[in-house]
Image (cartoon, rainbow, N blue to C red):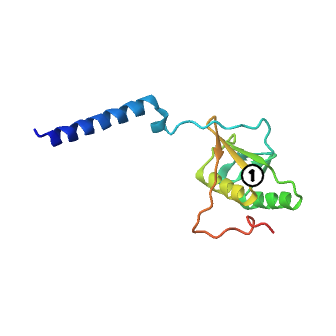
Amino acid sequence: MTARTLTTRLLGVSMLALMLALSGCYGRVRGGGETTVNVPTHYDIVLEAAKDGQFVLDGATLSPEDLAGHFRYLKDQKQLPKSVLLKDGPDSKIKNGHLENFASLQLSFHFTGYVEHKGKLQVLSAVQDKSEPASADSSDQ
């Protein structure tokens, strides 16, 4: 075995050992880690998921379009919420359609969105898709 081959193998083994040691010291790197969030004690609006992609707001069942209309009304009144909670309803769980509509509202009306699903509270961080043009609600007029 030549000195060059021996050096290359030792270097490879030492890099592998270093990588294993670092991943063992900081185990949350592989798991994605947990994020600490300042959870408000009070939400400006609490929405519940309803069947067929609808939402329940203060006991009233609203379609996504009606809910967007309510947010437009609040915008006209200069009473937009700062924090909105979406949680599972009594007869329906949060589905992808609920999340998509909620994220669209978040982008349009610039509130902090929280989602409580299966007992876990998470912050929804919606981002604008670069391939789609901005909606009329998101422009400041």
Quadrant for the N terminus, please.
Answer: top left
Nearer the observer, 87 or 105: 105
Residue in view at x 58 percent, y 66 percent: 130
Residue 52 in the image: above or below residue 91: below
Nearer the observer, 35 or 53: 35
Which x, y percent locates residue 124?
64, 48
Which x, y percent locates residue 83?
76, 46
- Left or right, 12 with respect to 113, comes to left
At label 1, counting other C-alpha atoms closer than 10 Å, the crowd grade (few under 14, some 14-19, many 20 or more) is: some
Which x, y percent locates residue 6?
17, 38
Q: Residue furthest right?
A: 77
Q: In the structure shown, which secondary structural element does the residue marked by tag 1 occupy? A: loop
Instruction: Write down the residue under mark 1.
Output: 111
- Left or right, 85 with respect to 1, comes to right
Residue in view at x 76 percent, y 60 percent: 68
Q: How many marks?
A: 1
Q: Amino acid at mark 1?
A: Phe
Quadrant for the C terminus, please.
Answer: bottom right
- Left or right, 1 with respect to 84, comes to left
Residue 68 in the image: above or below residue 17: below
Nearer the observer, 132 or 20: 20
Residue in view at x 38 percent, y 30 percent: 21
Which x, y percent locates residue 112?
72, 48
